[in-house]
Amino acid sequence: MAKSAWVLNQMNKLRVWPKGLHNGIKKVRSVLKAFTRTSLFTSLMTLSVLVNTIGMAMESYDIEESKRNDLDLMNEVFTWVFIVEMTMKLLARGPKKYAAERMNLLDGGVVTLSVVEMIISAQGGGSGAGNLQAFRTVRVFRTFRVLRVTRILRSLQSMALVIGVI
């Protein structure tokens, strides 16, 4: 018994975290990894995708200017939410493990296209044929955002599996 207590005491003295700046980075990554794997985080992101998809479905050709502005603001807010999600996952898991999941690749591609859309929209403030072409390009990028709905379908498949087990 005394020997096992001594071994336990020695093991408790071992450092789990590296010293210096790398210590802080490791701890932050550990916390981010734990948070991005929680059901709360996954549920919030799924809800964000659902609400964003509903907002995108509300757009139409003859929409009022105030409603269009509201939908554009909502689009920008959700783009930032998804940028933060991607950044958190990249920091937590690293690029290699992030890219190992196919859904992350899809999400990352959609976020990248959304950032390109934001940049094109920000630069297209004047008038002229070039801005009209940029506007059309932005509309094409928005259609790719609908691909995020596959995340909802994946969670529904998981739920159907759980219900099937019960």
Image (cartoon, rainbow, N blue to C red):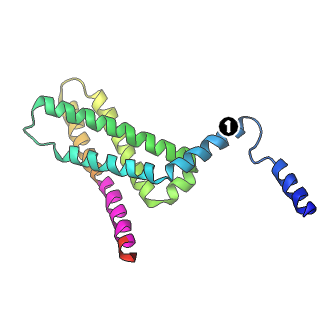
Element on which disc 1 rests:
helix
Q: Which residue is mark 1?
A: 24
Find residue 35 and report its horizontal and vertical position in percent.
52, 47
> Where does the image place residue 100, in percent across and percent down from the top left?
52, 59
For residue 112, side relative to residue 97 (left or right) = left
Between 82 and 165, the one lying in front of the other is 165
Is residue 8 depicted above or below 13 in this figure? below
> In the image, is 13 to the left or to the right of 49?
right
**In this view, 83 is above or below 149:** above
As displayed, is residue 24 above or below residue 41?
above
Residue drawn at x 39%, y 43% as measured from the top left: 82
- Residue at figure coordinates x 44%, y 48% from the top left: 41
Pick the residue in front: 115 or 163.
163
Q: Residue furthest bottom?
A: 165
Name the residue located 9 percent from the left edge and 32 percent from the top edge. 64
Vertical order, 121 against 54 (above or below): above
Q: Is residue 2 left or right of residue 164?
A: right
> Which residue is drawn at the image coordinates 56% and 54% (left, top)?
96
150 with respect to 55 (left or right):
right
Quadrant location of the C terminus in the rendered image = bottom left
The kind of secondary structure the magenta stretch mainly shows is helix
Range of magenta residues: 147-162
Q: Residue furthest left?
A: 62
Q: Which of the 4 quarters of the picture holds residue 29?
A: top right
Question: Which residue occupies the foreground of this view, 157 or 66?
Answer: 157
Q: Quadrant of the N terminus?
A: bottom right
